[in-house]
Image (spheres, helix red, strand yellow):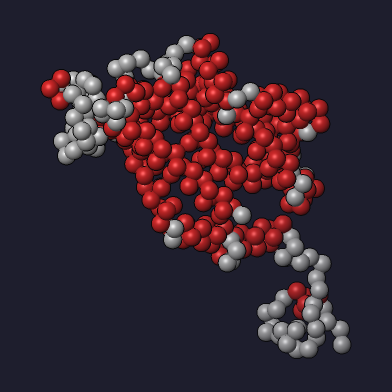
Amino acid sequence: MTVSAAHIASPAAGADPVAAGAGPVTTGTDPVTTGAGRAAGEALLDESQPGGRRANLAASLRTLGSRPGFVIAVLFIAFVVVTAFAPGLFTSHDPYATAPADRLVGPGVGHLFGTDELGRDLWSRMLHGSALTIKATLIALGIAIVAGLALGVIAGFFGGLVDALLMRGVDVLLAIPSLLMALSIVTALGFGTVPVAVAVGVGIVPGFARTTRAEVLRVKTLPYVEAARGGGASWLRVLLRHVLPNSWGPVAVLAVLDTGVAIIAIASLSFLGFGAAPPTAEWGTLISAGRNYLVTAPWVSLLPGLFVAMTVLSLNHISKTLQELER
């Protein structure tokens, strides 16, 4: 019996070749292996399968939400960020209003952190000081991430002589202590919040460059990158579509960790007098102003110092938790 091609191609007659015992019918093209079928299969796997991206993200959020320490750290950092942009929501005191009669009043209901040597409310000055310190930290991180990513991606992706030259320059920067480099830069640029932010940002660029380079070197040798190149994708498309998105995890963890490093560096430079000029409130300036009253009024330096320490420790805890999650 002769079966025509029309009968094989069209199942409308109701006969199932497999059910009828004729065995599997092989045609010239397999829809699963075509480009459209493969893309649809990958999309279906991504969206609905247990190992898809949405499921992994939901599982990660549930894991993070089940850790009380992580939740408390995130809430505290959120509070600090909000106070940096809207300090008036948490205090009604003027940070610059002096009251000699209330000089060096201890912490209490009226003054949560007490008052300083001029009778100014320390809690209000601490919150308003968040604006300068956090914004300077964001500027420093922006400089470090942009410059570090650019150096790391170029060095890791192109390799060879380009990699050698860029990494030798990064090694030179790593050999110089970051605080010493920041002091040199801020001395050349001048005093103020923005020069301090630029100096700190340049000081932490090498860490981002090294981390990004290591991740790019790892990712660019993976099979899906080679498959993309074999499929005709350009180097730019491979870089933007495959290498960068899959190299971002450790860099994001480092960004959270280096936020604490930047805060300490900015506060240190402000403590030494390189930050904003008085009476502007900065965290380092507030700690420095209480040095002469450590015996008679220790809260003037102690409470702002504890606030800074809690901020940095919260960032470190968030970074450590995210690093554990990455593993």
Q: Residue at x 40, y 57 (%)?
A: 68
Report the label total.
0
Query: Relative to 125, is 196 on the left or the right?
Result: right
The residue positioned farthest toward the right in the image shown: 1
The extreme front residue here reads: 295
Is 27 or 74 nearer to us in this picture?
Answer: 74
* Residue 290 appears in the picture as rendered: yes
For residue 79, side relative to residue 36 (left or right) = left
Q: Nearer the viewer, residue 102 or 280?
A: 102
Residue ID at (15%, 20%) = 100
In this rendering, position of residue 45 left or right of residue 219 = left
- The image shows residue 21, relative to residue 269, as above or below, that is below
Relative to 317, is 234 on the left or the right? right
In which quarter of the view is residue 133 placed?
Answer: top left
Point 75% across, 63% down: residue: 33
**In this view of the protein, which residue sits in the foreground, 83 or 153?**
83
> Where residue 238 appears, x then y in whole percent?
70, 42
Residue 319 horizontal/vertical position (percent): 52, 45
Coordinates of residue 67 in the picture (x, y in percent): 44, 58
- Quadrant in the rendering for residue 254: top right
Q: Is residue 54 visible?
A: no
Task: Give the quarter of the image for residue 88.
Answer: top left
Residue nearer the viewer, 89 or 29: 89
**Quarter in which the C terminus is drawn:** bottom right
**Quadrant the N terminus occupies:** bottom right
Seen in the picture, residue 191 relative to 290 is either above or below; the reply is: above
Image point (31%, 27%), residue name: 294
